[in-house]
Image (tube, helix red, strand yellow):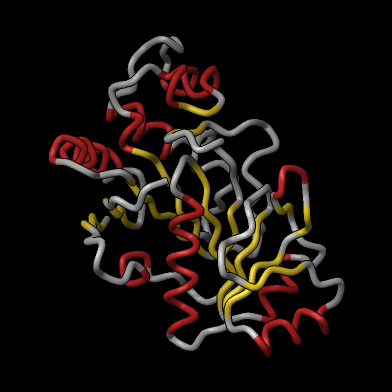
């Protein structure tokens, strides 16, 4: 397993080495920020990139956004914009999954980046029965956890706290430890849920804003070392 410290001024694509095809992002806060950084870097290299969701996202600022009804209309959008967001208008100004299927988008673009999970901007997440929605064609899954969740009560810092607590074997009022975060990241009912054996699996430990959090991140990475995680990227990307 690789452990990578990402410096903010550096490109982030080399840290994850996203493959052509579909990359899905799951877990806690920071997924959208990571997805958009990857998308913009990939498009700047000359690739055609689709950003989309199987749950809900807000339309990205400054990005051409549409919900093509047909493959032909999607091709036209990509011929005019190397970077596009596909999604269907939903409640509260958000976008839901587009009309096009993931396998159709995969045939149109070099890279398809999908936010496949929601966390209501909380650092940590445990999925419900219907989550996450990872297309079977996915080649890389990136699980995100916010280091600002460590040392705080599960009830305050995890989306679906009862489920998170159950995965940790704790009560909702107990504090989150580095071991808890690593356990949920690697758990088949946590962030590895719906991740098949033929998908690459990487982790982003976000909000590594100071030495204390970087120390927690190294503890988590050490515990993930035996969990078939391809790489752990430690960074401070924000939400």
Q: Which one is in front, 29 or 126? A: 29
104 left or right of 113? right
148 left or right of 121? left
The total of numbered circles placed on residues is 0
Q: Position of residue 186 (x, y in %)?
A: 41, 39
Q: Residue at x 26, y 46 (%)?
A: 225
Rendered position, 198 above or below 179 = below
Rendered position, 238 above or below 63 = above
28 left or right of 194? left
Q: Position of residue 73 (x, y in %)?
A: 82, 81
Q: Residue at x 64, y 39 (%)?
A: 131
Q: Position of residue 15 (x, y in %)?
A: 31, 65
Q: Quadrant of the N terminus?
A: bottom left
Point out the residue furthest to the left here. 211
21 left or right of 156? right
- Asked where in the image residue 128 lies, by quadrant, the reply is top right
Rendered position, 201 above or below 17 = above
Q: Residue at x 37, y 12 (%)?
A: 174
Point out the residue furthest to the right here. 69
Q: Position of residue 216 (x, y in %)?
A: 21, 35
Q: Which one is in front, 8 or 22? A: 8
């Amino acid at each position: 397993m690789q452990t990578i410290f990402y410096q903010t001024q550096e490109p982030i694509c080399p840290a994850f080495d996203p493959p052509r095809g579909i990359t899905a992002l799951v877990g806690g806060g920071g997924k959208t920020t990571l997805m958009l950084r990857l998308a913009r870097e990939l498009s700047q290299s000359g690739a055609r990139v689709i950003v989309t969701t199987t749950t809900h996202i807000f339309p990205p600022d400054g990005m051409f956004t549409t919900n093509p009804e047909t493959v032909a209309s999607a091709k036209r959008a990509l011929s005019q914009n190397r970077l596009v967001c596909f999604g269907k208008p939903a409640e509260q100004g958000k976008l839901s999954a587009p009309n096009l299927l993931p396998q159709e988008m995969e045939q149109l673009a070099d890279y398809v980046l999908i936010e496949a999970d929601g966390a209501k901007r909380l650092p940590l997440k445990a999925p419900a029965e219907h989550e996450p929605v990872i297309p079977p064609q996915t080649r890389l899954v990136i699980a995100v956890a916010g280091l600002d969740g460590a040392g705080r009560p599960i009830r305050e810092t995890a989306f679906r706290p009862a489920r998170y607590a159950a995965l940790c074997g704790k009560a909702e009022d107990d504090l989150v430890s580095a071991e808890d975060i690593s356990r949920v990241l690697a758990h088949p009912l946590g962030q590895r849920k719906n991740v098949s054996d033929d998908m690459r699996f990487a982790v982003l430990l976000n909000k590594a804003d100071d030495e204390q959090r970087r120390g927690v991140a190294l503890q988590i990475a050490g515990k993930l070392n035996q969990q078939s995680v391809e790489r752990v990227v430690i960074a401070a990307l924000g939400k």
